[in-house]
């Protein structure tokens, strides 16, 4: 069966520090991968999605970046965190976008102080 | 711009009643709409997917409708229970991405 792993579960980082969140999927190949952010009391904001290795589409311009170095690995990064980067970050995967269900990781609660 | 909207931020109902949540879309015609449940501090969990050529889909106490004329999907929970309290999200897929509405927080009171 397929599983998605996302870590860490919580993270407290100072302003200006770098960020690296990792997400891996097991049990499937060539998944569509997504990074979302959910600010407190807000909806899910799509940050990046990837349909294949090295293929990254950005939905919202910001100081975050994403990479997909391997088929089932998706990484969210920042060189310098801002206070506004605080939120709940979720990784997800699907077989096809839109017409199949998406499976979400447990999320990372990031607090930038 | 293409939008998917859930206009009700919150819905409070009594146990046993039917909860009806609304999802509207504008400026495009999605081939599919999905519904998810999200509990606090957790990732969303998929519930139902409905295609544009399907008027209605059911799963246990859940029912989803898709009205392409009104550009709207309705999500119903019949015989609601306090355990149904959560935030419910609708989503549409397009060109590789999956976009969510802001969600409706449902509270079922005993």
Image: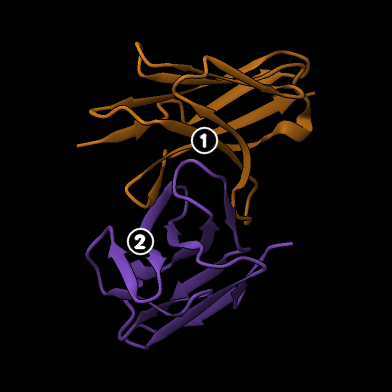
Chain colours: A purple, B orange
Quadrant including the N terminus of chain B: top left
A83 relative position to B80: left or right: left
- Residue lying farthest left? B1
Q: Quadrant of residue B109?
A: top right
Quadrant including the C terminus of chain B: top right
Q: Of residues A83 and A64, which is closer to you in this image?
A: A64
Point out which mark residue A89 bears: none
Image spot of residue A11 (x, y percent): 54, 78
Image spot of residue A17 (x, y percent): 37, 88
- Residue lying farthest front? A29
Look at the numbered disc 2 and give the secondary structure of its residue: strand
A54 relative position to A73: left or right: left
- Disc 1 crowd, CA 10 A, few/some/many (<14, 14-19, 20+): many
User: Residue under mark 1: which chain is it in?
Assistant: B
Discs 1 and 2 carry the same chain letter: no
Where does label 1 land, which residue? Answer: B34
Q: Of residues A27 and A38, which is closer to you in this image?
A: A27
User: Residue under mark 2: which chain is it in?
Assistant: A
Instruction: Tell me whether circle 1 and circle 2 mark residues in contact (CB < 8 Å).
Output: no
Where does label 2 land, which residue? Answer: A47
Image spot of residue B67 (x, y percent): 43, 14
Alpha carbon separation for disc pair 1 and 2: 19 Å
Q: Residue at x 44, y 23 (%)?
A: B52
Look at the numbered disc 1 and give the secondary structure of its residue: strand
- Disc 2 crowd, CA 10 A, few/some/many (<14, 14-19, 20+): many
In this rendering, the answer to whether A61 lies above or below B10 is: below
In this rendering, the answer to whether B66 lies above or below B47 is: above
Q: Of residues A4 and B3, which is closer to you in this image?
A: A4
Q: Residue at x 67, y 68 (%)?
A: A27
Q: Residue at x 34, y 11 (%)?
A: B69
Q: Residue at x 45, y 56 (%)?
A: A38
Image spot of residue B38 (x, y percent): 61, 45
């Amino acid at each position: 069966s397929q599983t998605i792993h996302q870590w860490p579960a919580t993270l407290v980082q100072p302003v200006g520090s770098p960020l690296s969140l990792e997400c891996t999927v097991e049990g499937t190949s060539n998944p569509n991968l997504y990074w979302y952010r959910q600010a407190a009391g807000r909806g899910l904001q799509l940050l990046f999605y990837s349909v294949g290795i090295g293929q990254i589409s950005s939905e919202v311009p910001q100081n975050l970046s994403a990479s997909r170095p391997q088929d089932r690995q998706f990484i969210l990064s920042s060189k310098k965190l801002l206070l506004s980067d605080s939120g709940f970050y979720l990784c997800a995967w699907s077989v096809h976008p839109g017409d199949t269900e998406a499976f979400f990781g447990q999320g990372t609660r990031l607090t930038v102080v | 711009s293409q939008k998917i909207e859930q206009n009700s931020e919150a819905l409070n109902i009594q146990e046993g009643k039917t909860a009806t949540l609304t999802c509207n879309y504008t400026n495009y015609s999605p081939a599919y709409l999905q519904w998810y449940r999200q509990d606090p501090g957790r990732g969303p969990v998929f519930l139902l997917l409905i295609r544009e050529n399907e008027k209605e889909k059911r799963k246990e106490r859940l029912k989803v409708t898709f009205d392409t004329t009104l550009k709207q999907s309705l999500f119903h929970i019949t015989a609601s229970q306090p355990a149904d309290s959560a935030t419910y999200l609708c989503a549409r897929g397009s060109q590789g991405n999956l976009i969510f509405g802001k969600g409706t927080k449902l509270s079922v009171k005993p």
